[in-house]
Amino acid sequence: MAMAALPYLCLEIIQQIGGELPNCDQMNLRAVCRELGVAIDPLFYTFFTLRGDRMRRDNGLYIMERLAARQIGWSHFAKTVHIMPGSKPETGEATGPKYYPSDPALPNLLVSALASMHNIQTVVWTVHANDPDWVREAICDSLNTLPLLSDLQLKTEGGVHLGLTPVPSLTKLRIESLDWRPVEMVQDICQVVGRSHHLSSLHLSGTSDWSKVWTLLRATLLRPKDSARIHLKELTTSFVTSDLLTYLHSYSGLESISLETSQNHRPKPDPLADRFFGTVLASHALTLVELSCPAGHEGRWSFGPHNVDAILPLRKLEILHLSVNPQDVADVEPPMNAVTLLLSTAQMLPALRLLEISSAARYRGRCEENIKTAIENFTSHLESAAVVCADEDVYELAPVLSDEPGERSTILAYRILDPVPSAVQILRT
């Protein structure tokens, strides 16, 4: 009876129900009747995966031809496309073009198929060095044909070169290296960034030096038209340089910053860390919602008395991830214990919801235990809604048991949350 009544529900309710279903159940629901098919199609066809190995098969080419002719649902409803080489060649097959079929008609077919999906907003492209040139050229040519493309995510492997051209509609750009080799298309990325006037989120990871990108971004702030200036609101990078800090200090309004400082193994003193906490953070104190800069090595990037005054003004901060140096935790009594000092500082941040504490040590086992001990020994009379994460454990502040039955203690301490609420899991991701 419930299934029979489903087609008579309003479109919004059917789509709300369908949105909770996995793709296989959506496919079954579409087959029930025409009315349900019309309602579920925009959900079922939202995500399209293009795998090179599937293009070697007849059904894969058939789908590409139907896409190019706009005779399939993905042409009308797809919002995200994920492009990947797919499975590796079979034993005995040569690498390289064998990931994709070799057919002289395929480059134009691939361009037409991608261009048919007019509603694409996100492109996730995994690029391998063994991909044939025609594949890379066809995909790069297609990007400018997607009028709503706002989020481009490139995952590179093997130091590939891409002939990227500007995509003016971009608001988010993510470049991620999947191996140890530097990304070798910094100049191409500069061209894309420089023409993306609406860019607000930038993620650059890997061992590459991105100084040219930061210099370009700073130069955009000198443009006469405010609409052509690029003020990033979200930034993630794994290589901190002086040019990066110069750009960050040149404007205000950053909302989220993540610095993976493990690439910066520097001896004390560290002028970059001192400059970041001493002057750069102050430029964004009124807007910063998320700050993550855990260090992979002991040094000035870790939390301590030297950067308390940089953290306290961040009144809108909701998520904070910092590291502590092992020698600042082991056998150090409160209040000078770095974990105790960080917990006390976090309580002064009114908007904080998540504090993550990690160890700035190559071998972290002992230090992580010391961090947990310091958290469990912490007591306070100040309430805080923020949860604290250390390794796999999640803590919340709660009253300790009172000596008097039925009385509420005014002393608060951290206790482990088990299970971890889904809201906290979402925050951690």
Image (cartoon, helix red, strand yellow):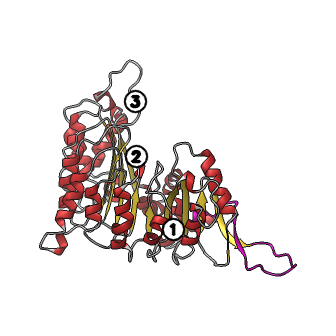
Residue on which the image places disc 1: 16
Q: Name the residue at 41% across, 20% down.
A: 91
Q: Which mark is residue 88?
A: 3
- Do residues under tags 3 and 1 come within 8 Å of each other at their CB atoms? no
* Above or below: residue 201 compared with residue 114: below
User: Going by the image, does 407 lie left or right of 158?
Assistant: right
Q: Residue 26 location, x and y as percent?
A: 51, 55
Q: Which mark is residue 265?
A: 2
Quadrant where the N terminus sits is bottom right
Q: Residue 364 location, x and y as percent?
A: 57, 46
Mark 2 to mark 3: distance in Å?
Answer: 36 Å
Q: Name the residue at 21% across, 66% down.
A: 197
Of 423 and 177, nearer the camera is: 177
Q: Name the residue at 68% across, 57% down.
A: 373
**Pointer 1 local density, CA inside 10 Å: few below 14, some 14–19, many at least 20:** few
Q: What is the magenta range? A: 400-426
**Pointer 3 local density, CA inside 10 Å: few below 14, some 14–19, many at least 20:** some
User: Going by the image, does 238 lie left or right of 386?
Assistant: left
Indicate yes or no whether the magenta region holds residue 406.
yes
Q: Name the residue at 54% across, 76% down.
A: 348
| Three-letter amino acid code of the residue under disc 2 | His
| Three-letter amino acid code of the residue under disc 1 | Gln
Q: Residue 333 location, x and y as percent?
A: 65, 62
Which of discs 3 and 1 lies nearer the camera? The answer is 3
Of 368 and 41, nearer the camera is: 368
